[in-house]
Image (spheres, grey):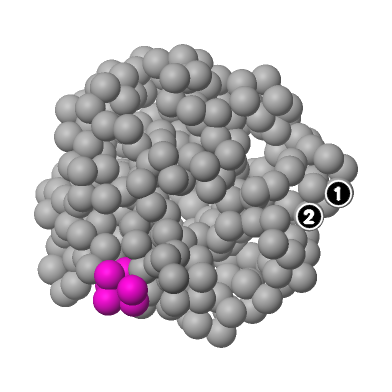
């Protein structure tokens, strides 16, 4: 019997962590391109990408910055490129959509509801900040809402999905987000195979523990039957334990410095370190890593030749 194929997504830099938290966090377009390419070479079949201002590492939605690394990654690897539509909770929706609408990628993330997205607890750990914006950004999440209304989501599905042929990594931070996705399915605005990312461990969303993972899977099974693929990301130190459980449960996995800065007990020196770590775990579970071509087939993607970069 052939081994089951598991998609490894690598979220290369994100907008959660800041440069002062790790010297290995990719910030510049050169660093993001190099780290993404290395992650693909290590086995990641999907690369989930954010951009940062190369001057000081703060999150940016500027399409011109994205275009400094997207073509380079595409030229160097066959990996599926997945661009965030989340960006940062402090960005407007139009800002968040600027780069995806220009790039017309195969995949984008889509957050399935408005929520508290609290990063301010990271201020509790004493550190020397390299940039004034870092603690200010974290503190700002104490009193902001990550806005993803039904109108917002409808607009993304229409403009990116219908308009660009982009398919989505539906990021579900709580059980209610699964029901919101089912609502869009029932209205015919999304169709299978759905790729659902269970997001565990963000303060404001569902907690990162095995019981919650099992519950999310149970509800998704009830709502979507066999018309979906699921993947799991877990924040911080719960990353590897919970994605290992997810793989054993029949799911796919997401790693990357967006979600955790560590490889074991040490700071990960690259995204590829985490890809290699989970690849070894998958091998130990008698599972095989999906190639980019296999991931495209599993998720019914349009192909890397139909993007705009």
Secondary element type, mark 1: helix
Q: Quadrant of the N terminus?
A: bottom left
Is disc 1 surrounded by few (<14), some (14 to 19) or many (20+) residues within 10 Å?
few
Kindly state the secondary structure of the residue where label 2 is placed: helix
Of residue 105 and residue 175, the one placed in the foreground of this image is 105
Label 2 belongs to which residue?
A: 182
Residue 303: % across, % down: 48, 28
Note whether 275 is above or below 221 in the view shown.
Answer: above
Residue at x 67%, y 43% (from the top left corner): 148
Tell me which segment is drawn in magenta.
281-286
Q: Confirm whether residue 57 shows in the render.
A: yes
User: How many marks can you see?
Assistant: 2
Q: Residue at x 82, y 51 (%)?
A: 183
For image coordinates 71% across by 38% down, the residue present is 153
**Does 229 appear above or below 90?**
below
Q: Is residue 256 magenta?
A: no
As drawn, which residue projects farthest toward the front?
Answer: 1
Residue 186, numbered circle: 1
Tell me residue 189's x, y (percent): 79, 38
In front of the other: 98 or 21: 98
Instruction: Judge whether residue 124 can be spotted in this image.
Output: no
- Please identify the quarter of the rendering in which residue 262 is found: bottom left
The reply to whether the C-beta atoms of the residues labelled 1 and 2 are less than 8 Å apart is yes
Report whether 1 appears left or right of 199: left
Q: Position of residue 265 (x, y in %)?
A: 16, 74
């Amino acid at each position: 019997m052939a081994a089951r194929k598991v998609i490894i997504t690598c979220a290369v830099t994100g907008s959660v962590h800041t440069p002062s938290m790790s010297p290995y966090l990719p910030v510049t377009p050169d660093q993001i391109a190099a780290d993404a390419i290395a992650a693909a070479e290590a086995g990641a079949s999907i690369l989930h990408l954010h951009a940062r201002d190369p001057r000081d590492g703060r999150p940016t939605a500027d399409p011109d910055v994205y275009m400094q690394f997207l073509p380079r990654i595409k030229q160097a690897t066959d990996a599926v490129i997945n661009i965030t539509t989340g960006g940062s909770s402090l960005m407007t929706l139009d800002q968040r959509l600027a780069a995806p609408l220009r790039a017309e990628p195969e995949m984008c993330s889509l957050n399935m509801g408005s929520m508290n997205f609290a990063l301010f607890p990271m201020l509790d750990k004493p550190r020397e900040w390299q940039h004034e914006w870092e603690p200010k950004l974290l503190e700002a999440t104490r009193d902001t809402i990550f806005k993803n209304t039904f109108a917002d989501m409808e607009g993304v599905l229409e403009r990116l999905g219908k308009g660009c042929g982009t398919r989505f990594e539906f990021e579900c931070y709580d059980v209610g987000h699964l029901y919101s996705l089912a609502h869009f399915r029932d209205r015919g605005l999304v169709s299978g195979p759905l790729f659902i990312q269970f997001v565990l461990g963000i303060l404001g969303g569902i907690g990162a523990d095995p019981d919650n993972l099992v519950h999310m899977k149970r509800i998704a099974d009830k709502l979507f039957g066999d018309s979906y693929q699921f993947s799991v990301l877990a924040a911080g130190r719960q990353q590897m334990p919970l994605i290992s459980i997810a793989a054993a449960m029949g799911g796919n996995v997401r790693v990357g410095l967006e979600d955790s800065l560590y490889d074991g007990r040490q700071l990960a020196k690259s995204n590829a370190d985490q890809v290699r770590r989970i690849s070894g775990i998958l091998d130990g579970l008698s599972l095989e890593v999906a190639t980019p071509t296999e991931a495209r087939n599993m998720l019914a993607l349009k192909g890397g030749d139909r993007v705009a970069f």
